[in-house]
Image (tube, grey):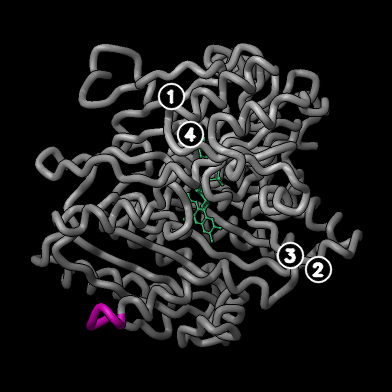
């Protein structure tokens, strides 16, 4: 890693102000990882512009000095995507947090990319609208981060993930040039560049403004919590509900280890700790018909072996039923000091079998796995809790992780459902892409970033690391 040119920090400070350039080691520690704390690399500096103009001028300076630019939102990512793994300067969006326009007639809004996901929905609420994609981290993560990861969330089973809601993007390219992709119907006659940018994990440029589609807040909601003796039974209930043609807004599972962690924490939600799994089922939409759908889902849960099904009768009860799921990640620290959050997707029908294989792998390596996942999408999060001070245990975590990925891919799934590839899963890319396909991905990145300085070291492995990658 080359040292930063001596004049660089002063140049950056002249644009954003000295308070918004961070270069002392203590403060850089905050930026050395994201929520996947298994990876730690402090950047050489962090700069926090306030708008597109400042971001563009910052990018121009970095470009002139040939220094990598690493976009960062709130750092809640779970794949090491916002880390300066190859050196360089993090450009954070935390000051770009203004909602620029809410246009209820056209059900759209324009926000700066550092706006938090829930802040956008709060701003739209007075108009009976909301922003549908709802990552469980939604009170902390940014819209720009959601765009970069094409984030999902509990309600994305029915509503679809981020890409469906992004209609325009203002992007600062690594050269410092600013471009609008799409926006107000402009995209229709051209290539879908917005679609291309969404999910690009910070490798194509820094999104500074985002135009989004808003949707009406649903008229009514029905929420159930089904308690099962085994995780496999809960998986079977999910398959039955979806195969029957029901479309819940959410189908979310937590397993026994997760329930124990939640119940031992300040977020205790009253889930029974002897249960093998709990399944949250939620329907929303127009009032008529919702009760019937909920009854049908309850029947499927009971047929799959649910020993108890709780129904929320009020919004307070709904919040209580969700609590064990929503607070799950935050309570994992009850189980061990470290957590490797995994993310993979399998066809829904393969869920019971894949869950059994994961349990078998955990037992063989004598590791504790806590499953929390968007079951309706087949999006698994087998989270391995461990203590990284134990080198042998850490080695086992890596080996088990790799096996779990292999099981998911063999079942017809893929290596990430929503957390992205980042630095964490780059090594697994050859499990799902051929060398030719990887080369196509590299060429696409080259269009936006010909010199390879926009969030380098992420997503696509370099050609010399393709062979045996993932092995
Ligand atoms: C408890 C918890 C629950 C979570 N639940 C979910 C969930 O349900 N669904 C889900 O999909 N994810 C979930 N996540 C993961 C994470 O919150 C999302 O990936 C989120 O979109 C990241 O947003 P961020 O602002 O924190 O981005 P960061 O972590 O800062 O960055 C993530 C990536 O986006 C890039 N990036 C950030 N901002 C920009 C920008 N403006 N322009 C270009 N690139 C940018 C970065 O370079 C990096 O590659 C969860 C995380 C936690 C900790």
- The answer to whether 226 appears left or right of 92 in the picture is left
Residue 81 horizontal/vertical position (percent)? 62, 40
Residue 145 pos. (x, y %): 48, 42
Under tag 2, what secondary structure?
loop
Residue drawn at x 41%, y 40% is: 113
The answer to whether residue 121 is seen in the rendering is yes
Inspect the magenta stretch and tell me whether residue 218 lies in it: no
Q: Which mark is residue 161?
A: none
Tell me which numbered mark, 3 or 4, is placed earlier along the sequence: 4
Q: Which mark is residue 196?
A: 1
Residue 199 numbered tag: 4
Tell me the tag on residue 338: 3
- Note whether 415 is above or below 129 in the view shown: above
Q: Residues in magenta?
A: 312-317
Residue displayed at 37% across by 36% down: 163
Precedes in sequence: disc 3 or disc 2: 3
Q: Is 117 displayed left or right of 3 in the figure?
A: left
Q: Residues within 10 Å of mark 3 (few under 14, many from 20)?
A: some
Q: Secondary structure at mark 3?
A: strand
């Amino acid at each position: 890693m080359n040292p930063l040119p001596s004049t660089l920090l002063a140049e950056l400070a002249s644009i954003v102000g000295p308070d918004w350039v961070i270069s002392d080691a203590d403060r850089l520690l905050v930026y050395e990882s994201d929520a996947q704390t298994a990876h730690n690399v402090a950047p050489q500096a962090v700069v926090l512009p306030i708008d597109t103009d400042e971001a563009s001028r910052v990018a121009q300076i970095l470009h002139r000095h040939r220094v990598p630019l690493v976009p960062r939102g709130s750092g809640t990512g779970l794949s090491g995507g916002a880390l300066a793994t190859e050196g360089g300067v993090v450009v954070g969006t935390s000051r770009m947090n203004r909602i620029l326009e809410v246009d209820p007639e056209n059900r759209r809004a324009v926000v700066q990319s550092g706006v938090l996901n829930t802040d956008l929905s709060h701003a739209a609420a007075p108009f009976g609208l909301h922003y549908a994609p709802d990552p469980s981290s939604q009170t902390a993560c940014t819209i720009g981060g959601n765009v970069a990861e094409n984030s999902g969330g509990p309600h994305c089973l029915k509503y679809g993930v981020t890409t469906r809601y992004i209609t325009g993007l203002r992007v600062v390219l690594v050269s410092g040039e600013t471009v609008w992709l799409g926006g107000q119907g402009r995209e229709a006659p051209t290539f879908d560049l917005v679609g291309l940018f969404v999910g690009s994990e910070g490798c194509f440029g820094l999104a500074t403004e985002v135009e989004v589609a808003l949707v009406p807040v649903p008229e009514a909601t029905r929420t159930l919590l089904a308690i099962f003796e085994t995780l496999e039974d809960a998986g079977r209930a999910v398959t039955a509900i979806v195969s029957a043609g029901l479309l819940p807004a959410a189908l979310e599972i937590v397993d026994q280890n997760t329930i124990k962690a939640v119940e031992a924490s300040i977020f205790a939600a009253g889930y029974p700790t002897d249960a093998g799994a709990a399944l949250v089922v939620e329907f929303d939409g127009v009032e008529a018909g919702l009760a019937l759908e909920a009854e049908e889902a309850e029947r499927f849960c009971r047929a799959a072996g649910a020993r108890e099904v709780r129904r929320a009768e009020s919004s307070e009860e709904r919040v209580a039923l969700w609590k064990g799921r929503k607070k799950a990640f935050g309570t994992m620290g009850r189980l061990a000091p470290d957590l490797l959050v995994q993310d993979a997707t399998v066809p829904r029908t393969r869920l019971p079998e894949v869950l059994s294989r994961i349990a078998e792998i955990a037992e063989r390596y004598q590791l504790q796995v806590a499953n929390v996942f968007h079951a309706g999408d087949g999006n698994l999060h087998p989270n391995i809790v461990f203590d990284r001070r134990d080198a042998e245990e850490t080695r086992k975590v890596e080996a088990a992780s790799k096996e779990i990925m292999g099981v998911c891919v063999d079942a017809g799934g893929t290596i990430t459902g929503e957390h992205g590839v980042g630095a964490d899963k780059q090594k697994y890319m050859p499990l799902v892409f051929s060398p030719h396909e990887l080369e196509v991905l590299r060429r696409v990145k080259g269009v936006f970033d010909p010199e390879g300085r926009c969030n380098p070291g992420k997503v696509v492995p370099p050609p010399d690391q393709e062979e045996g990658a993932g092995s």
